[in-house]
Image: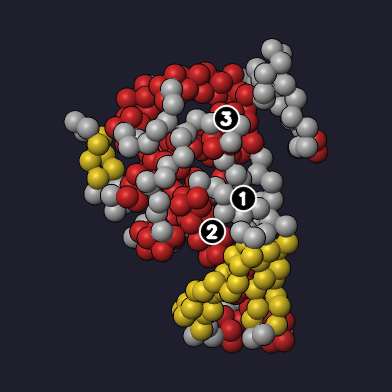
Amino acid sequence: MARIVERAGIGKAEGLLGLQMICEDCDLTSLGAQITSGDGKPVPAEDRIWMARIFFAEEIQGWFRAMNAIWNTCYFGCLNAVHMMTYVDDDLVCSDIGASSRILGAFTENNFLDVLESSDIAPSTVLEWSLRCRGFWNGSAQSRVEKAVACLTHCFEAASGRQDTYSTLMWSLAGLEALFCDSEAGITYQIRRRAPLLLSDYPIRNLDKMLVKGYAFRSRLFHGDVRMVSAFRRDEYPSDDNGYELEAEKYADFFLAILCCSIRACIERGSTEVTFSDGVNFS
């Protein structure tokens, strides 16, 4: 495992920030020795080296994408990774161009939330808190909070380009249900009863009403009763039959905002787990 020895900003202009992460103590020769072919045949030494460099570079980019998603809890999804480059021994190995994360509509046209001027969280605080969510970083989330964070990172995936509305909606719902629900029975009731306990400090408008309407839309979506955009026509946003905005976009923003605020509430209390017995309990 490589050791991260430096994370630093490398320049900013007009709202743009460059981040640099430097790793050391990675033995590419040892890593290459572990590479085998699918048919069991030996892999030539020269091939093992360049394959090891690619695997290592992809691992580094994976770490950065995870950190980008974690940091987005500070900015409600407005932190966009536009260009990631990974060098190994001064050679460019991987480069992602044009990637971006979803920007929440809750602060713009849908306006479910007031601007939280008094609820700033430093990115360093979020990252240090996340390190205690070991299941998340190990790729096997266990606790309620870890599962919610894992779902949130799918919504803020830096390499996905323009995030699909339906994917955002489904991952946000999955995160909320992992955080608030004990069973599959009465999911809407559990979230309606418990979400206000966790989100008492957040100015979310019409929380209960929107949860009811949002889960009604979820049921319609799962039963194939709503209009959907084809994957190859993502630039178009058709209205529903009443001429209103596409409902999926609205509820995707709403549920993502609720999930983001719920995780922020845990971060603010330094908690990596919550339970709901006679109120909300942080641990």
Residue designated by label 3: 110
Residue designated by label 2: 68
| Residue at 65% from the left image edge and 53% from the top image edge | 100
Residue 142 in view, yes or no: no
Mark 3 belongs to which amino acid?
Answer: Asn
Position above or below: 144 against 45: above
Tag 3 or tag 2, which sits nearer the N-term?
2
Q: Are marks 2 and 3 in contact (CB under 8 Å)?
A: no
The residues bearing labels 2 and 3 have C-alpha atoms spaced at a distance of: 24 Å
Which sits in the foreground, 112 or 248? 112
Mark 2 belongs to which amino acid?
Answer: Asn
Residue designated by label 1: 101
Viewer-nearest of discs 2 and 3 = 3
Mark 1 belongs to which amino acid?
Answer: Ser
Which sits in the foreground, 178 or 7? 7
Helix, strand or loop for disc 1: loop
Q: Are marks 1 and 2 in contact (CB under 8 Å)?
A: yes
What x and y, as percent, mark residue 94?
A: 69, 71
Which sits in the foreground, 112 or 177? 112
The residues bearing labels 1 and 2 have C-alpha atoms spaced at a distance of: 9 Å
Residue 207 left/right relative to 12: left
